[in-house]
Image (cartoon, rainbow, N blue to C red):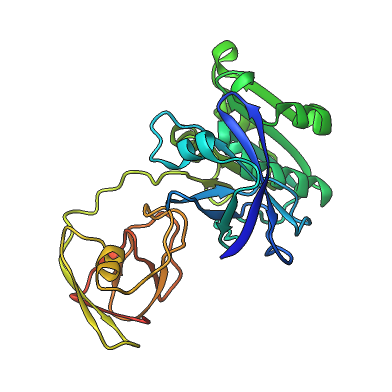
Amino acid sequence: MQPTILDHVDRVARDVVSLVLRAERGPLAPWEPGAHIDLILPNWLTRQYSLCGEPDDRERYRIAVRHERLSRGGSDYIHRFLRRGHPIEVSAPRNNFPLRPAPEFLFLAGGIGITPILPMLRAAIAAGAVATLVYVGRSLATMPFTAQLRATYGGRVRLVATEHEGRPDFTALAAELPPRALVYCCGPSAMLDAAEAVFPAGRVHVERFRPPVKDFGPPRAFEAVCARSGRTIQVPPGETLLGALGHAGIAVPSGCREGVCGSCEITVVEGEPEHRDHLGAPPGRMYSCVSRACSPRLVLDL
């Protein structure tokens, strides 16, 4: 974790604030477009937010937070209580949504989904790629950074206020997609589903704030053996591996607890995990907040 100070709080759209976090000491960890950080809030909640500032700025991180009507406590606390000068612990950046090299890009952003797309658009253009952005929101008043985008990128950016124009035609955009272009999309689940349905598989990359609903069947009990400590933990059907480890006093870092942020990754030494995350865990790893076991026993590097 890295200590930071909340340096600026600016309202950038209706119900959206931009936070600039300044390093308390020393440079902040480097990051690349698509990365996010965990904020450890003073109310003990941990929340993930995409970085939307300048990757070259090692003194400051910038994020933007929408005040959700059905807030689970994170956005509500940020909007109501955080003020300039508050100390906030943040994690090192993690990137589950990396920008891959390509000669052309189509970026699609919905609402607060503009946050990871902003540095991507900047990086793509700086690399000499042809890049365009279709940015969708209910109204211009609810869409952060529109003035910045218009002033900086002009005709490369198309702003779509659905209350007046309706939703953009993704099928038409897919038909016009150049053969070597990649598509990056972040926004509400319905928008991401529509993008994945019409753009070529392997060329469309999405980041979800919430995992899609999947049916894995009823959870089964299993045994988790901690190889380094020698302890054996029973994980009942109604409890997650992360929860069972925590109740046994074995701390594992965690953030979203929904299988989308990657912060609770652990190494599997033996046994077959049942991957229930949306990220796609690398071989020999699993995300303990949602994933379970196909085998009766898992041996973990804990």
Residue 140 seen from this side: yes
Q: Position of residue 243 (x, y in %)?
A: 27, 63
Above or below residue 273? Residue 16 is above
Above or below residue 195? Residue 217 is below
Q: Position of residue 141 (x, y in %)?
A: 63, 19
Quadrant (top left/top right/bottom left/bottom right) for the C terminus = bottom left
What is the quadrant of residue 173 in the picture? top right
Q: Nearer the viewer, residue 28 or 296?
A: 28
Tell me if 124 is positioned left or right of 255 in this view: right
Above or below residue 225? Residue 36 is above
Q: Position of residue 292 (x, y in %)?
A: 27, 65
Q: Residue furthest front?
A: 85
Q: Nearer the viewer, residue 111 or 172?
A: 111
Quadrant (top left/top right/bottom left/bottom right) for the N terminus = bottom right
Q: Nearer the viewer, residue 235 or 215?
A: 235
Q: Residue furthest top?
A: 164
Residue 92 seen from this side: no
Tell me if 281 is positioned left or right of 139 in this view: left
Q: Nearer the viewer, residue 54 or 222?
A: 54
What is the quadrant of residue 142 in the picture? top right
Q: Residue at x 38, y 40 (%)?
A: 72
Q: Position of residue 215 (x, y in %)?
A: 25, 49
Q: Residue at x 18, y 75 (%)?
A: 296
Total residue callouts: 0
